Image (spheres, rainbow, N blue to C red):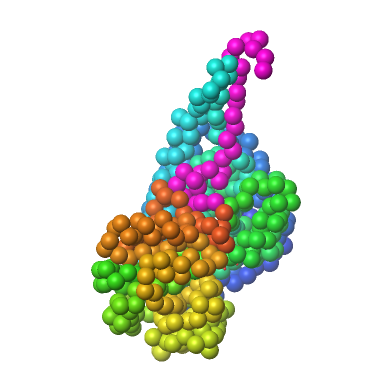
């Protein structure tokens, strides 16, 4: 590893932590310690926020065109080091190499997309609004909300960071990024790129460390005006409560338990392929994983047979092996959680179609077999709670209205997938589902142009698209009386 992983990126330079503490970064496929990273503390946060506040003054006044140049330079840097970034992501997160390459490519696209939106802000500044009263004229300006805290999880370390850094910088906000303590390496690589493309000091700061000790003081800092968080529901709740103390902007991207509904008129092979991708991609450690399969009763037997064949054929191993489709889970704790969830589901009455244990021959690494559970009771945790692992729960339905009822019977509202060849039906069902994302005849595709986020316990606000940019902008109306002497 050639990164400055024992230092934070603050004010354009690499600085050791003020406390001197570190934490180990683990390769989940081998359980080896890859390196030590700096454990940020309130002193490091103080320095990083001070750098962001100082830089905000000038960065907030740059033109959108200037900011677009910087974002495109970052995109170019990512592109030119894409293979190294992808390999680092595999070693730190465990995901298969093909998926890590896709993440890097999506991060590049994200920076380029927000570079274009940054330029559009210039054109939109001072947009006039038609008013019903001829004595007045109003114009709308879009101003950066200010120094922003960006807190991301380990599931998509680079991509989740890109989804927040790119719109924040495009909007003219400076930022302090706190990556997950489990996966800080590609974020630190991004810091090195920022340094190389001469991002003005303090525009992007990166502080590594543990959640409560590094993320906590960042969220509570009075000079932070905006918090963009992706992670679990309990931490999201705590962050929202902290933001309420001094009325900070907050957007929350939280967990899910998303359904995939397969109707009997679906193209079976295509449906099975997407069902498998929707849950076993990134080992099921995906907030929007379609982890609840609802299959129409008369298709169930055939679908389960094909599903079992396909799942058993998946290649499990180190993500660095090009042939591997399923890598290790992120940590020993995560594997334990998944294993306990499966044991509890079987205790609750679910049947095991396949999987349910550590794969044979993989004694090192946090591997767990892709697992399919049949008919967990509606109230069992395997049906209601996010497992965040390679575990698919299956139940059947008879009618369209029953499918919608079962799909919506959850505290979450992130994503859903619908498989049918009847497009009038898919449209009807899509409109009836309580979710921020609905995929028809597919699962999980993501594009920077369209908003991503959920309702209910899955969060508040959206990443990506124009909506993603709005998290970092304050609209300001300037209203002028154009008829002197005209009093109200
Ligand atoms: P987590 O909530 O434990 O941690 C997320 C981030 O918050 C980490 O960087 C962590 O260090 C930090 N953190 C922890 N405690 C904190 C505190 N008290 N104050 C400030 N920061 C703190 O989640 P995780 O285990 O890293 O990630 C998995 C979760 O993320 C899953 O629930 C998954 O569904 C969710 N997720 C959601 C989306 C989405 O777009 N909705 C995307 C990816 C992951």
Q: At 54% from the left edge and 80% from the top edge, which residue is drawn?
A: 380
Q: How many marks?
A: 0
Using the image, determine if residue 306 lies above or below residue 205: below
Q: Nearer the viewer, residue 306 or 419?
A: 419
Q: At 30% from the left edge and 65% from the top edge, which residue is drawn?
A: 420
Q: Nearer the viewer, residue 398 or 167?
A: 398
Q: Nearer the viewer, residue 100 or 382?
A: 382
Q: Position of residue 33 (x, y in %)?
A: 54, 75
Q: Nearer the viewer, residue 252 or 335?
A: 252
Q: Is 182 on the left-hand or right-hand side of 87?
A: right
Residue 476 falls inside the magenta stretch: yes
Q: Position of residue 447 (x, y in %)?
A: 39, 53
Q: Is 417 on the left-hand or right-hand side of 222?
A: left
What is the residue that sits farthest to the top in this orientation? 485
Residue 46 falls inside the magenta stretch: no
Q: Position of residue 79 (x, y in %)?
A: 38, 53
Q: At 36% from the left edge and 64% from the top edge, which residue is drawn?
A: 418
Using the image, determine if residue 250 lies above or below residue 93: above
Any part of residue 472 in sight: yes
Using the image, determine if residue 372 lies above or below residue 150: below
Q: Position of residue 269 (x, y in %)?
A: 26, 72
Quadrant of the snapshot with the C terminus: top right
Any part of residue 100 in sight: no
Which contiguous range is marked in magenta? Answer: 461-488
Q: Quadrant of residue 98?
A: bottom left
Q: At 51% from the left edge and 44% from the top edge, which residue is drawn?
A: 469
Q: Ligand 1 appears in which quadrant?
A: bottom right
């Amino acid at each position: 590893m050639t990164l400055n992983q024992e230092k934070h990126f603050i004010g354009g330079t690499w600085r050791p932590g003020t406390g001197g503490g570190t934490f180990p970064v683990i390769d989940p496929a081998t359980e080896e310690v890859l390196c030590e990273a700096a454990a940020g503390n309130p002193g490091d946060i103080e320095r990083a926020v001070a750098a962001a506040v100082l830089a905000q003054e000038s960065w907030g006044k740059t033109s959108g065109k200037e900011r677009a140049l910087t974002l495109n330079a970052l995109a170019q840097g990512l592109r030119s080091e894409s293979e190294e970034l992808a390999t680092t992501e595999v070693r730190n997160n465990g995901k298969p190499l093909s998926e890590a390459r896709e993440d890097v490519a999506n991060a590049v696209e994200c920076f380029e997309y927000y570079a274009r939106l940054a330029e559009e802000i210039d054109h939109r500044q001072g947009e006039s609004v038609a008013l019903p009263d001829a004595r007045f004229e109003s114009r709308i300006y879009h101003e950066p909300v200010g120094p922003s805290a960006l807190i991301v999880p380990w599931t998509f370390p680079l991509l989740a960071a890109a989804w927040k850094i790119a719109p924040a910088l495009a909007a003219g906000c400076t930022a302090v990024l706190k990556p997950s303590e489990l996966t800080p390496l590609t974020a630190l690589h991004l810091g090195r790129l920022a340094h190389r493309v001469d991002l003005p000091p303090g525009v992007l700061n990166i502080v590594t460390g543990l959640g409560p000790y590094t993320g906590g003081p960042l969220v509570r800092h009075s000079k932070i005006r905006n918090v963009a968080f992706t992670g679990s529901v309990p931490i999201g709740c705590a962050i929202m409560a902290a933001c309420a103390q001094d009325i900070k902007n907050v957007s929350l991207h939280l967990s899910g338990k998303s359904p995939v509904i397969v109707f009997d008129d679906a193209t079976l092979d295509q449906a099975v392929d997407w069902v498998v991708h929707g849950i076993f991609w990134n080992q099921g450690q995906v907030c929007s994983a379609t982890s609840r399969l609802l299959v129409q009763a008369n298709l169930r037997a055939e679908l389960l047979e094909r599903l079992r064949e396909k799942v058993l054929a998946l290649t499990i191993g180190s993500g660095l092996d090009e042939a591997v489709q399923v890598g290790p889970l992120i940590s020993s704790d995560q594997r334990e959680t998944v294993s306990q969830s499966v044991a509890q589901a079987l205790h609750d009455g679910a049947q095991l179609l396949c999987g349910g244990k550590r794969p044979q021959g993989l004694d090192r690494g946090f591997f767990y077999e892709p697992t399919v559970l049949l008919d967990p009771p509606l109230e069992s945790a395997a049906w209601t709670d996010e497992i965040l692992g390679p575990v698919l729960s299956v139940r059947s339905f008879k009618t369209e209205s029953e499918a919608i009822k079962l799909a919506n019977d959850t505290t979450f509202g992130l994503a859903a997938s619908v498989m049918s060849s009847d497009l009038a039906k898919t449209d009807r069902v899509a409109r009836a589902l309580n979710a921020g994302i609905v995929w028809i005849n597919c699962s999980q595709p993501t594009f920077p142009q369209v908003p991503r986020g959920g309702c209910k316990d899955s969060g508040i606000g959206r990443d990506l698209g124009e909506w993603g940019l709005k998290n970092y902008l304050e609209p300001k109306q300037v209203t002028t009386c154009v008829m002197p002497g005209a009093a109200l």
